């Protein structure tokens, strides 16, 4: 339940229906589902719960709007994104409150996500007018080669709950810039932020039908027919590897172009020559951003034995000082996890490590009271057989392992089916380059605990995904290449 007048106002102002073809509609039989505040477990509001038929109506709206949208001037598409960037920035306080209420993270973190999310619109507003092609004389000197890049067509975008806005703008921004229409399905735990964003985009001038929002709890049943329908040409998904694998299989039917931003299991390697204070600072960011509920969260800390105790003590001091509470309260740095299942999974991983011999240096116990809280936790002496050495923790838990040889650290860091991001701390430039090259990851944080940046290509290797979001390549995911062989 919203607790203050302001909380009630921001929740009341969010559109609660399906947004299809520029109109707000009820779901079939007016079905709805509840959105909870994870800090209290209480209901915030209800939103439309789409049926498979509703999903198909949204797809038709996106398909119908595609030709006209593809023909819209790139400058106009860019200016809509730019206006939306400005509106998001102006309204950051209200959007942050909505995000905190439905997802749990502290307000300061919601605001930081909003800045990051809005940057994708600013970045792609600039990219919209830079979609280039190629023209060249054939090698034989006779013909000409013309290469053009065209919008791929209607897209299906599926987003997770952990970054409710940024995971949306990272897809919507390039799709709009490229001239694609879309159906977006936000996570059912956090639908309100994307519904708010859809209203902002309409206000910024996005034509009806370009962005259609489908909220549902019958997720597989509603998404399946859209993926199987030949009118969708692109599927962009951010979420777990398990669901991503299923979606890749389903996408094979129509040979869809897919972007998959999947799970992570990031290693955080600190060499003996690292600046330990900077490494601890980076570890706090890599571990505690988003309460550890981030695909980029440091999952395994490999610390050189010479500095392991110093690093651990300093990390324990910082982690045990963090204020835990409802994300709307002043000074709170750690909100609740998103739901009871998520909190219980984190507790299970910690208990498993402790049973196998890990030492709890701080945290490690579910607190009493309402909400899905878990305290910042540091574990040392963690055996490699512990489940959290292999599984994504998605919570505020830092397991520490030690090493003495760089080769052992790299082998351990790469010993996972995931490959999203790795963090590396060293002051030696040639070691930094050598080890960065050997880390099997789509991204490396070198002496820094955060890699997210709208202007850089974000994505993973191995089972962490396919494709890149952001940077100069982000728009390519929404463009198809056509080559015209010219006889001149
Ligand atoms: P999830 O369970 O895979 O859900 C992600 C989205 O997929 C939600 O919208 C969900 O809808 C939907 N979904 C679930 N089953 C589906 C199905 N059968 N067909 C179509 N859509 C389906 O993941 P999550 O728990 O929300 O997010 C956490 C995961 O996301 C973590 O593994 C994290 O690493 C990953 N992630 C990756 C990145 C990246 O960039 N690599 C970024 C953020 C998060 P419902 O909500 O209705 O179930």
Image (cartoon, rainbow, N blue to C red):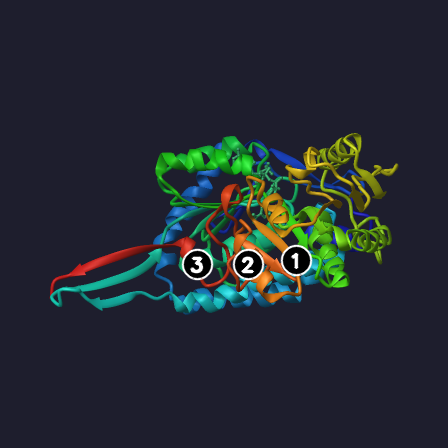
Q: How crowded is mark 1: few (under 14 residues within 10 Å), some or many (20 or more)?
A: many
Ligand 1 quarter of the rendering? top right
Q: Earlier in the sequence, mark 1 or mark 2?
A: 1
Q: How crowded is mark 3: few (under 14 residues within 10 Å), some or many (20 or more)?
A: many
Q: Which of marks 3 and 2 is nearer the N terminus?
A: 2
Instruction: Write the residue at 79% across / 30% down.
Output: 355
Residue bearing mark 1: 113
Q: Is residue 141 left or right of residue 134?
A: left
Q: In this view, does 16 lie above or below 429?
A: above
| Residue 180 on image: x %, y % | 41, 54
Residue 176 lies in quadrant:
bottom left
Q: Which of marks 1 and 3 is nearer the N terminus?
A: 1
Q: Indicate the secondary structure of the residue bearing disc 2.
A: helix
Give the number of the disc on residue 475.
3
For this rendering, which residue is in front, 141 or 51?
A: 141
Residue 76 visible in the displayed image: yes
């Amino acid at each position: 339940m919203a607790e203050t007048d302001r909380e009630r106002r921001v929740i009341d102002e969010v559109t609660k229906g399906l947004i299809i073809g520029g109109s707000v509609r009820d779901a079939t039989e007016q079905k709805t589902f509840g959105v909870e505040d994870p800090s209290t477990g209480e209901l915030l509001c209800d939103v439309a719960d789409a049926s498979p038929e509703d999903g198909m109506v949204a797809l038709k709206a996106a398909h119908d709007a595609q030709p006209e949208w593809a023909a819209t001037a790139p400058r106009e598409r860019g200016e809509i994104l730019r206006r939306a960037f400005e509106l998001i920035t102006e309204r950051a306080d209200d959007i942050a409150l909505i995000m905190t209420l439905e997802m749990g993270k502290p307000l300061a973190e919601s605001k930081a996500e909003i800045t990051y999310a809005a940057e994708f619109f600013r970045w792609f507003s600039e990219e919209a007018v830079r979609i280039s092609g190629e023209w060249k004389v054939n090698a034989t000197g006779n013909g000409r080669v013309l290469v053009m890049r065209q919008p791929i067509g209607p897209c299906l975008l599926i987003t997770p709950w952990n970054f409710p806005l940024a995971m949306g703008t990272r897809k919507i921004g390039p799709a709009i810039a490229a001239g694609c229409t879309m159906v977006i399905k936000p996570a059912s735990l956090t639908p309100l932020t994307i519904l708010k964003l859809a209203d902002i985009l309409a206000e910024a001038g996005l034509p009806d039908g370009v962005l259609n929002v489908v909220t549902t709890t019958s997720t597989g049943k509603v998404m399946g027919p859209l993926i199987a329908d030949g009118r969708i040409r692109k599927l962009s998904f951010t979420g777990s590897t398990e669901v991503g694998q299923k979606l890749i299989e389903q996408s094979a039917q129509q040979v869809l172009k897919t972007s998959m931003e999947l799970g992570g299991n990031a290693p955080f390697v600190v060499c003996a020559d690292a600046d330990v204070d900077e490494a601890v600072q980076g570890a706090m960011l890599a571990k505690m951003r988003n309460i550890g509920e981030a695909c980029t969260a440091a999952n395994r800390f490999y610390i050189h034995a010479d500095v392991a105790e110093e690093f651990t003590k300093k990390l324990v001091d910082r982690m045990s000082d963090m204020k835990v509470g409802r994300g709307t309260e002043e000074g709170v740095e750690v909100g609740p996890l998103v739901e009871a299942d998520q909190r219980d999974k984190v507790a299970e991983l910690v208990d498993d490590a402790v049973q196998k011999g890990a030492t709890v240096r701080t945290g490690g116990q579910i607190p009493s009271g309402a909400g899905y809280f878990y305290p910042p936790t540091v574990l040392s002496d963690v055996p490699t057989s512990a489940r959290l050495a292999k599984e994504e923790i998605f919570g505020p838990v830092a397991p520490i392992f030690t090493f003495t040889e760089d080769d052992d650290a790299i082998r351990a860091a790469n010993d996972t089916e995931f490959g999203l991001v790795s963090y590396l701390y060293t002051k030696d430039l040639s070691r930094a380059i050598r080890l960065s090259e050997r880390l099997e990851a789509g991204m490396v944080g070198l002496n820094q605990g955060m890699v997210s940046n709208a202007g850089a290509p974000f994505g993973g290797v191995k089972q962490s995904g396919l494709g890149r979001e952001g940077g100069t390549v982000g728009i390519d995911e929404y463009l198809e290449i056509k080559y015209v062989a010219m006889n001149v």
